Image (cartoon, rainbow, N blue to C red):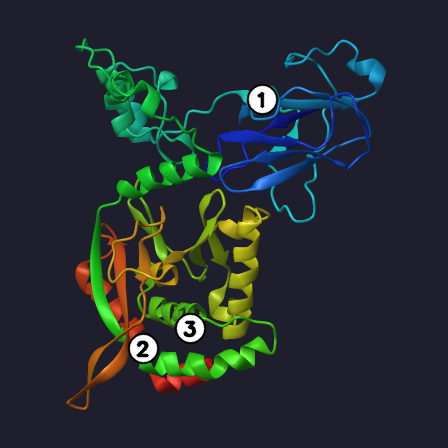
């Protein structure tokens, strides 16, 4: 008999949601047959049966899984006779890691874990551990709010403050419900929305500043207008975004500290020598970040096609974890929504910066001393002020402007 568990797959994933069982309790299944759809923070994955046999469902639909929870048992009917629903205390044969379906790169499930894997790991730096000892705190009892559950100094202070007597204050939600009992509705957050909330909280820990400027995108606009019909012959929808990505990559090469992340514990800047550009994509379950891997090595049409393919996967909820991780710098395309002039987007933690591009508008521009109507692209760069200064953000912005206003550079890309 094999037992399937929800295990830690990294990427900060700590919960899963049983979205839909594809078989019924007690069904006979074949090895590699899809059993259940599980929604994680990042994607919906299908779990296949590790062996042929009878399935005993433990985790019901709509239930929330924590790391280590049992999902189901699969085995001979005689082996499952004594298994009760909800049982997690059986000694069973360990099975190999369950292989996900072909479109899933990383499964949120595996099989019986060892005792060492099941023990809660306390993640903290030596300085935080020393601080805990000095404060007389059992660090194993502290809940970490850092990446992967890492315990931060603020977590220790918060834990210590919980022991102090405080006058209870009614929660705002409780007061609101009492006053408007029949006029409010409570909505449970989806796994994706929970992930977005956690990422926004992490992003808010970054000391940020913003640089804003304008690009004369007239040459870019004319180039796209000319090349778009050619791309459509190959079944590719060409937009401004692939050109912006290629220009951004060149600007990042000139300003490498933006293509980086900040290691707070070691106080080091981790500069990436590869260029994986993240893009915000709206799906039915919320915003996700798709990643164009090795964007510096791909041409405009390849990037355009990849944007469309990954965007479709977000919309039909077949996007994989691998297709949404390891970005080095992110672009948020506010202009695609049809509005916005300038904005201050949230940094995609733990990156150093994010580029917001807005709607291209007809505006007055000065060319050779003459005022004329041009296509103007507003943009904003939000950056981690621990890693780079405002002057460096201006240099990055100027490089981006130079490439996107350069007819020769754009013609080379087109």
Q: Which mark is residue 122?
A: none
Label 3–label 2 contact, CB within 8 A = no
Residue 168 found in image quarter: top left
Label 2 element class:
loop
Residue neighbourhood size for the residue with mark 1, other residues' Cα within 10 Å, grouped as few (<14), some (14–19), many (≥20): many
Of callouts 2 and 1, which one flags the residue occurring earlier in the amino acid sequence?
A: 1
**Residue 138 relative to residue 228: left or right:** left
Q: CA distance from mark 3 to mark 2?
A: 11 Å
130 vs 242: above or below: above
179 vs 380: above or below: above
Provide the residue designation for mark 1.
69
Q: CA distance from mark 2 to mark 1?
A: 53 Å
Residue in the picture at 63% in, 26% down: 5
Residue neighbourhood size for the residue with mark 2, other residues' Cα within 10 Å, grouped as few (<14), some (14–19), many (≥20): many
Which of label 2 and label 1 is nearer to you? Answer: 2
Check the image and name the residue furthest to the front. 182
Residue neighbourhood size for the residue with mark 3, other residues' Cα within 10 Å, grouped as few (<14), some (14–19), many (≥20): many
Q: Nearer the viewer, residue 79 or 170?
A: 170
34 vs 414: above or below: above
Of callouts 3 and 1, which one flags the residue occurring earlier in the amino acid sequence?
A: 1
Residue 33: image x %, image y %? 77, 37
Label 1 element class:
loop
Label 3–label 1 contact, CB within 8 A = no
Which of label 3 and label 2 is nearer to you? Answer: 2
Residue 32: image x %, image y %? 77, 38
Residue in the picture at 69% in, 13% down: 90
Provide the residue designation for mark 3.
243
Residue 355: image x %, image y %? 32, 60
Q: Which mark is residue 217?
A: 2
């Amino acid at each position: 008999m094999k037992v399937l568990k929800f295990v830690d797959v990294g990427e900060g994933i700590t919960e899963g949601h049983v979205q839909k069982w594809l078989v019924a309790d007690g069904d006979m299944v074949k090895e590699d047959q899809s059993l259940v759809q599980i929604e994680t923070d990042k994607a919906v994955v299908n779990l296949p049966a590790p062996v042929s046999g009878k399935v005993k469902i433990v985790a019901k639909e709509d239930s929330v899984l924590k790391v280590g929870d049992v999902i189901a048992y699969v085995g001979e009917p005689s082996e499952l006779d004594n298994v009760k629903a909800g049982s997690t205390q059986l000694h069973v044969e360990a099975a190999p890691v369950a292989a996900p379906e072909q479109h899933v790169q990383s499964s949120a499930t595996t099989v019986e874990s060892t005792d060492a894997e099941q023990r809660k790991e306390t993640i903290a730096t030596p300085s935080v551990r020393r601080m805990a000892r000095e404060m007389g705190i059992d660090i194993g009892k502290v809940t970490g709010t850092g990446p992967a559950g890492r315990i931060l100094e603020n977590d220790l202070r918060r834990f210590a403050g919980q022991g102090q007597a405080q006058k209870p204050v009614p929660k705002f939600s409780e007061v609101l419900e009492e006053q408007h009992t029949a006029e409010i509705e409570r909505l449970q957050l989806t796994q994706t929305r929970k992930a977005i909330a956690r990422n926004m909280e992490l992003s808010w820990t970054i000391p940020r500043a913003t640089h804003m400027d304008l690009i004369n995108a007239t040459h870019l606009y004319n180039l796209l207008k000319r090349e778009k019909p050619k791309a459509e012959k190959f079944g590719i929808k060409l937009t401004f975004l692939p050109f912006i990505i290629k220009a951004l990559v060149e600007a990042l090469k000139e300003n490498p500290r933006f293509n980086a992340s900040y290691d707070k514990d070691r106080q080091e800047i981790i500069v990436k020598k590869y260029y994986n550009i993240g893009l915000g994509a709206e799906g039915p379950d919320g915003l996700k970040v798709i990643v164009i891997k090795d964007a510096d090595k791909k041409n405009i049409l390849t990037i355009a096609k990849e944007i469309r393919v990954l965007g479709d996967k977000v919309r039909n909820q077949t996007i994989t974890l691998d297709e949404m991780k390891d970005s080095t710098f992110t672009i948020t395309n506010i202009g695609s929504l049809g509005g916005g002039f300038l904005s201050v987007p949230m940094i995609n933690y733990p990156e150093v910066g994010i580029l917001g591009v807005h709607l291209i508008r007809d505006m007055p521009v000065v060319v050779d001393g003459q005022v004329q109507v041009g296509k103007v692209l507003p943009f904003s760069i939000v950056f981690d002020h621990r890693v780079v200064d405002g002057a460096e953000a201006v240099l990055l912005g100027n490089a981006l402007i130079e490439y996107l206003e350069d007819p020769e550079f754009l013609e080379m890309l087109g």
